[in-house]
Image (cartoon, rainbow, N blue to C red):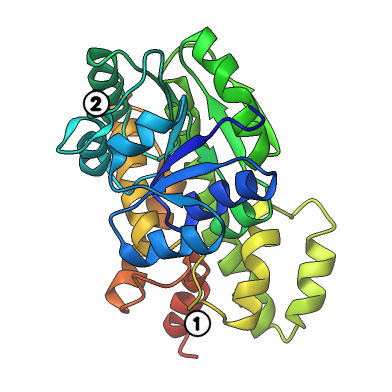
Amino acid sequence: MAGEPVGFLGLGVMGSAMSGHLLAAGVPVLGFDVDPARRAGHAARGGAVCANPAEVARGAGVVVTSLPGAAALHAVLDGEGGVAAGARPGLVIVETSTLSPQAKQEAADRARAFGATLLDCPVSGTGQQARDGDLVAYLSGEPAAKERARPVLAAFTRAQHDLGAFGQGTRMKLVANLLVAVHNAAAAEALLLAQRAGLDLGAVLAAVGDGAGSSRMLQVRGPLMAAGEFAEATATVATMQKDNALIAEFAASLASPTPLFSASTVLYQAAVAQDRLREDTACVFGVLQRLAGQ
C-alpha cells in the first residue's frame, strides 16, 4: 500500500478520523465530501480534495466509503459524477457505513455492474475511538478483495475480523449495536442511582469499571455522563436513532425478541423529545436526571 493513494468518500466524524490515520502514516488520500467545510478540513490535514467521487475512483485502487445512509451510498456509486464514471479495473470499495443488509446488497450489485467489488465492512466504535485508532472492522465479502483491503484497514482499526461471506459484517454490526444501545442506557441508569445515593461518580467509574459490572460503554461514555458533557458528540442521538431502527427491522425480520433493547429505545426517543438530537448518546444520563426531577 505504501505510496499508493487510497480514496475516501465521506469525510465526517468517522471518515475524517479514519483517513487521518492513513495521512499520518504517509499514505496519500484522495477525498470527497458534499460538505465544503469537510473538504477544507481534509485539505488542512494534508489530503488531496477531489471534485467528485469519479475523480477519487480514477486515482485510487481502494476506495473507502463512510456515509450517513443508503441514498448517499447509492448516489456516490452510480449517480452523477459517481464512482462508476471513474472506476479503474479491479476497484475495491470498502463500505464502512452502518446500513441495512438490503442496502448493502444493492450497493454491491451496483458496484458489480461497473466492474468494482464492494466489501461489506462496517466498523465498531465511536468518533473518539476512531480518532484514537480504536475501531474494530467487521470484514465480509470476496476473498481477493479482502486481501487488498487489509493493509488499508490496518492503518485505522486495531482489529479486523474476517466474517466470511458478504453481508455477515453488517449482521455482526447490528448485533454489536444492540449491545451498545442497551449498555449505554444501563450505564446511565447505574450512574444516576449512584449519584442519588451520594456516591462520587469518579469513584464509581474507577471501582465499578474495575469489576464485573464494567462495560465498554461505561468506560467510553461514563466519564461524559459524570461530567454532563454531551454537546461535543462522538456519536449523536440522531445516528443512534437511525441505527436503532435498523436493529429493530433486522430483529423483526428474524422474529427474534428484543425486550431489553426495546426498553432502552424509549430513552433515546425521550432524548429526541428533549431536543437532544445532536447531542452525544451519553445524554441519556441527562434524560434520566430530568425524569428524576433533577
In the rendered view of the protein, which quadrant contains the N terminus? top right
Locate residue 207, reporting x and y percent.
84, 66
Q: Say what secondary structure mark 1 lies in.
A: helix
In this view, the residue in front, 151 or 216, is 151
Above or below, comparing residue 34 to residue 122 in the picture: below
x 59%, y 15%: residue: 147
Above or below, comparing residue 35 to residue 79 in the picture: below
Q: Can see residue 177?
A: yes
Above or below, comparing residue 285 to residue 148 in the picture: below
Tell me the tag on residue 225.
none
| Residue 89, quarter of picture | top left
Residue picked out by circle 1: 289
Residue picked out by circle 2: 84
Q: For the residues marked 1 and 2, what is the alpha-carbon distance in whole angstroms?
A: 50 Å
| Residue 150, quarter of picture | top right
Locate residue 46, reporting x and y percent.
56, 56
x 48%, y 29%: residue: 121
x 32%, y 37%: residue: 55
Query: With 145 as the anchor, is 77 left or right in this view?
Result: left
Above or below, comparing residue 281 to residue 76 in the picture: below
**Amino acid under label 1?**
Gln
In this view, the residue in front, 74 or 125, is 74
Q: Can see residue 181?
A: no
* Residue farthest along the left direction in this orientation: 80
| Residue 66, quarter of picture | top left
Q: Say what secondary structure mark 2 lies in.
A: helix
**Amino acid under label 2?**
Ala
Locate residue 82, reporting x and y percent.
23, 35
Mark 2 surroundings within 10 Å by alpha-carbon count, few (fewer than 14), some (14 through 19), many (20 or more)? many
In this view, the residue in front, 110 or 69, is 110
